[in-house]
Image: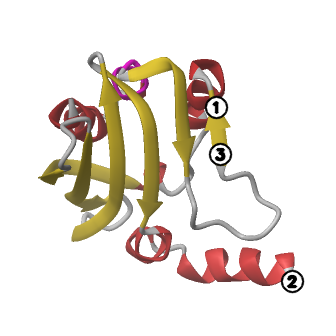
Amino acid sequence: MIERLANAMETGRKDIFIAQFAEDAVYETPFVLAGQQSRWEGFAAVSEHLNADNPTRSLLAFDKVSVVIHLGADGEEATAQFLVDGRVLATNESFHLPSSIGIIRVRHGKIVHYTDYTNVLRGAQVAGVLKQFGASLEALG
């Protein structure tokens, strides 16, 4: 399951990534600012969120997505560390990005809960948009 997620990230196949979620799945991103949505419940909401455009991702080419998996004690949960090697499209400069850590609970072959701790700052830095990212945060006050 987690290898399929990594492969979908590497190939840019959001549809394959999203297809791994159960109808009653929950997707969370705890590292957000106060007042921002951080939880999506149900396949439709998760799908809509994950299908949203990611302008930073469009600046990067993912050549290889590796994953380090730590299995949980109960057999349904695992922690996955996703590592991306790629290139900045504008400069062809290579990068290595520890992109996220996910705590993923799977039941009957589908993801029922995914807590995604994304490395937003390093992603913005790699993409060359850290100043713009900082300015957008400053505008929020």
Name the mark nearer the viewer: 2 or 3: 3
Q: Which mark is residue 39?
A: 3
Q: What residue would you read off at disc 2?
A: 141
- Residue behind mark 1: 41
Real-space CA distance between mark 2 and mark 1, rounded to the nearest whole angstrom: 28 Å
| Res. 17 in view | yes
* Tag 1–tag 3 contact (CB < 8 Å): yes
Query: At label 2, which amino acid type do we have?
Result: Gly
Q: Earlier in the sequence, mark 2 or mark 1?
A: 1
Of residue 120 and residue 35, the one placed in the foreground of this image is: 35
Name the side, left or right, on which 42 lies relative to 5. right
Residue at 35% of width from left, 60% of height from top?
100
Label 3 sits on a secondary structure element that is strand
**What is the CA distance from the residue labelled 1 to the residue labelled 3?**
7 Å
Identify the element where label 2 is drawn: loop
Quarter of the view holding residue 39: top right
Image coordinates for residue 86, horizontal then vertical, percent: 22, 58
| Label total for image | 3
Q: Are marks 2 and 1 in contact (CB under 8 Å)?
A: no
Q: Amino acid at mark 1?
A: Glu
Highlighted range, magenta: 15-19
| Position of residue 87 in the picture relative to residue 118 (left or right) | left
Q: Are marks 2 and 3 in contact (CB under 8 Å)?
A: no
Give the mark toward the camera: 2 or 1. Answer: 1
